[in-house]
Every structure is written in C-alpha cells, then in structure tokens.
Image: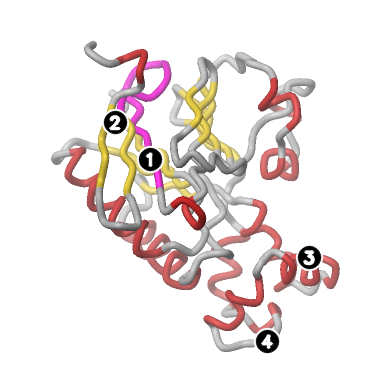
Amino acid sequence: MHPITYAIGDIHGCRLELERLLGAIDAHAAGRSRALVFLGDYIDKGPDSAGVLRTLMDMQHREPAAVVCIKGNHDDLMVRAALGDVDAHDKWLTMDGGSVLAQYGVSKATALPRYIIDWVAALPTLWTDGLRYFVHAGLDPSRTLEDQPDGVRMTMRGDFLSRDIDFGRHVAHGHTPQFSGAPDLRPYRTNLDTGVVQTGALTAVMFPPVVGPPSAIIATRRSGGVAISEPADRAGV
C-alpha cells in the first residue's frame, strides 16, 4: 500500500511559512503513514534560506525514507557557484544569492559550508512515488521520460505549461509562480509554486494512495491562517 503523499511548492527562504505548513500537514495526516516531497527552490528571495535548508536537512536525516527533496534551479545555481563556476556565481547574485551568502557570513559561494553544498548537489531532479512524477519545473513533451536532462527538469516552461500533456502519470511541479496565491490544477499536472515571497501563500497538496490528481489543498498565509480545501472537481465527493 502506498502512503499518502504531500507535495510542497517553492519555499524561497520563507522558513516561518514552511514551519507553519508542516504543522498543518501533520494535523491533516492525523497519524497516517505519509511521504513529503519538496519541489525545489529552497533558497533566495525570502529572509531565511539558511533556516529552510537546515529544516529540510534535519527532516531528511530523521526520516530518510519519507522525505524527498527535489533540486530546483536556484538550488542548482548555488551549487555550481560554490564549485567555482564564475558565470553561475554572477547569475546567482542577480537572483538574490547575495542574501544567502550574508546569512552564512561569507562573501563568495566557494566559502559556503561544504556539507550543505554536498547535500544540495546530490538531490534528484525527478522522483516518482509509483503513481505520479515530481519535478521542479516540468518535463519536455518532445522528449521521452528517459531523455529529460536535469536542466530541462529544473527550468522547463514552454509547451509543458501551454499544452495539456499526459505523461502517463500526473506531474507535480513548481517553478512558475502563481501570483493569485492558489495552485494551478490541471488534468495532467499541478503547479504548486504560489509565489510565497510575494503572496505570503505556501501551498501543499495531498495525493491519495491511488493514481490521479490531488484530493486536498493545504495553504498557509503569512498572517498565520491555514486553509484546507478540496479541488473544485472533487468537492462533495
């Protein structure tokens, strides 16, 4: 039997919203076996990227079989910069990498703690629970599943967003912010990036242990509120 699976959208340094959402997920799971899948972009833009990374690393250490962290494009840029890629370093600084450096008290990515870089570098860019695919940005409809480079998985938009493509399993992803503060629910994919830095909304969905789309939406607000709802097409089921 598959456990229920919670997928969590882009966090971008918003540790307090993450902790509030994790508490809401625990209450919703109510002791049931569950997996947590984080969809990447843990850093930049928000106030506490270092705290977000620490929280995720601690969770994965405690529950290695139940906590999956997908690598996002911001996370990847940090790793490349830390490994000495000058172009990546310059690009990362334009995407708020400087705030992450400041949180660690360093001026260059090469001085970031190595254990953090090693952890982020090893994260997958695609994961499946056997029922769905989880990826940061998306999949290229012109490629087979086996021929999806990491760069595509971390940055894909284009046809993935503009066309309703059935990849054989529902795809949970982030990367493209929904400034409405609500996830984008489609027949074959769910976009969970609800632009937390701008909207204050950090969102998770719960996937039941059967094939298909999510059956519950859990969203926290910067003001402290938590909203739990069903997707419109499941309301009343």
| Labels 4 and 2 touching (C-beta < 8 A) | no
Q: Which numbered marker is on residue 107?
A: 4
Q: Is residue 187 above or below residue 230?
A: above
Q: Which residue is mark 3?
A: 91
Pick the quarter of the image with the C terminus.
top left
Q: Report the residue marked by disc 1.
A: 204
Give the Cα separation between the discs numbered 1 and 3.
29 Å
Residue at the spot 28% in from the left edge and 56% down from the top edge: 20
- Whole-number angstrom distance, CA of label 2 to CA of label 1: 16 Å
Amino acid, disc 4: Ser
**Position above or below: 148 against 18:** above
Quadrant into which the N terminus falls: top left
Amino acid found under the numbered disc labelled 1: Ala
Disc 2 packing (10 Å; few <14; some 14–19; many ≥20) = some
Q: Which mark is residue 3?
A: 2
Q: For mark 1, does the 10 Å Cα neighbourhood hold few (<14), some (14 to 19), or many (20 or more) residues?
A: many
How far across and down, in percent of the image, does residue 72 sit? 61, 51
Q: Is residue 215 magenta?
A: yes
Find the magenta span and give its range: 202-216
Residue furthest to the right in view is 87
- Mark nearest the camera among 2 and 1 is 1
| Element under disc 1 | strand
**Residue 111, x across and y down, in percent:** 66, 84
Q: Residue 37, located in which quarter of the rendered image?
A: top left
Say which label, 4 or 3, has the lower sequence index.
3
Kindly indicate the quadrant of the structure image that contains residue 82: bottom right
